[in-house]
Image: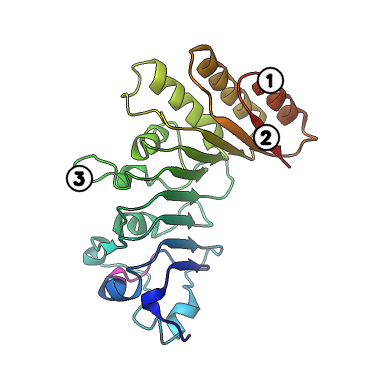
Amino acid sequence: MDCDLYSLKSLDAENFLLPGDLASIRSRAGQSFSRLTSLTLRRYNNDARSLRIMMDSSAFRPLRFRSDPSPDEEATIVSLPYLQTLILHPGVLKPRYLQQTVSAIHAPALRHFELVFPDSKIPGQNVADILFDASKRPRFPLVDTVVLHNASNSGTAPYFVQAFPYTSQATIGGLDVGLFPLVLRAGAYSHAYPGSTYWHRLRNLTLRQPRPETLRVVREWIKAEYHRGRLPPSLVVEGSPDNPDIRGFCQLCRIYTRVDLIG
């Protein structure tokens, strides 16, 4: 691969073992990836194959990926000062290196955080507790766009809200559709959670693959927002217009806010 790494702005890697040899990445990150503004890591296979294009190309020769990180590597910090978009699609529910990847990335300018797990009756690996620094402050405080799919449970969903307090656009899918409205409603109107457990700037919410029972939760939250004098976010529902549950949900919620259905 013949490329100028100094000008590399976007990297999208598939079949990528998350993350591999972090010490090696750190040794050249300042030269190779310091100007990245968008980083996407995808893994669609359950085996331990890493991204061959990185290992075999001369441009990326410094990157080596091993299956067993050392304690020193786990503490490695990869500084990406210009990174604005971080997209993580592990492809499996319990990826080996996802937590180390999130822990390693230092991206103070990050604006878009995306974590998408496969559909399942159980959530994917927990990363909520590593979205905060040692002082319990959000590590990515400027994020305003959040995409989460099957990423939380009833115990971790509040931490995702607290980790991204300035969220104005959110996309939730899978199990998350039924969890975040409950957290936001409790954070706004009760003492169950601290005051930071609410997205005060949320203006647009997209629902991916919602189920009938989760649609009811969203509808009740939107209704409560409206009757308490708050402006509910605009909704985008990804689903079939032929589905009676989705069609009925859209009709009812249009009383309170704008709703667009994308089939």
Q: Which mark is residue 252?
A: 1
Which numbered mark, 1 or 2, is in the foreground of this view? 2
Left or right: where does residue 13 sit relative to residue 209? left
Residue in the picture at 58% in, 44% down:
120
Residues at marks 2 and 3 touching, judged by CB atoms closer than 8 Å: no
Q: Is residue 64 in sight in this rendering?
A: no
The answer for how far apart the CA atoms under marks 1 and 2 are is 12 Å
Q: Mark 3 belongs to which amino acid? A: Ala
Residue holding disc 3: 134
Type of amino acid under label 1: Leu
Q: Is residue 130 left or right of residue 92?
A: left
Q: Which residues are magenta?
A: 19-25
Disc nearer the start of the sequence (1/3): 3
Which residue is tagged 2?
Answer: 260
82 within the magenta span: no
How far apart are labels 1 and 3 at the CA level? 44 Å
